Image (cartoon, rainbow, N blue to C red):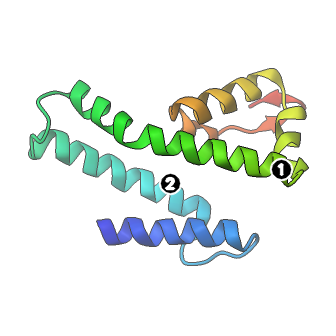
Amino acid sequence: MGSLRTIFAISVFFTHALPGASVLVGGRYAVQLFYVISGFLISYVLIAKKAYPDVKSFYVNRYLRLYPIYLVVALLTFAALIASHHASFIDVYRNSPPAAIAMLTFSNLFLFGQDWIMFLGVHSHHLA
């Protein structure tokens, strides 16, 4: 399972590095398949291996392991975008309706709901 997740991560990397190219399975499918496999592995760790005494301790552990480095990388990326005057990132927020801005901000700050973003879009200046 780990090697499949690695292949999917490489697919996402190349999709971002080479826009328009579809390497391996393509970025969108790779993210969705990564989520499916990760969900399976999380259930396996919680139910079959009994690695954590309860679900709450699992999520607290995951949060403490992932969030600090995520926050550092997100802040450094944001600072680099501002320093490079890369306007397209800011334009996404500038041209989006308030519901989309709220959803993007919430999901990027708290790492919750990022998979939902894949199924949302903006049509006629409304979140759909």
Which residue is found at the position 18% from the left and 46% from the top?
45
Find residue 78 and report its horizontal and vertical position in percent. 72, 44
24 displayed left or right of 85: left
Residue matched to label 2? 32
Which residue is found at the position 18% from the left and 39% from the top?
46
Which residue is found at the position 61% from the left and 36% from the top?
108
Is residue 118 visible in this depiction of the protein? no
Instruction: Give the camera-side residue of 98 and 87.
Output: 87
Label 1: element kind = helix
119 displayed left or right of 9: right
Find residue 125 and report its horizontal and vertical position in percent. 88, 30
Is residue 64 visible in this depiction of the protein? yes
Which residue is found at the position 27% from the left and 45% from the top?
42
Mark 2 crowdedness (10 Å alpha carbons): few <14, some 14-19, many ≥20? some
Find residue 44 and report its horizontal and vertical position in percent. 19, 47
83 displayed left or right of 14: right
Q: Which mark is residue 83?
A: 1
Instruction: Give the camera-side residue of 101 and 37.
Output: 101
Instruction: Give the camera-side residue of 80 and 55.
Output: 80
37 displayed left or right of 126: left
| Residue type, mark 1 in image | Ala
Q: On the image, which quarter does residue 56 sit in?
A: top left
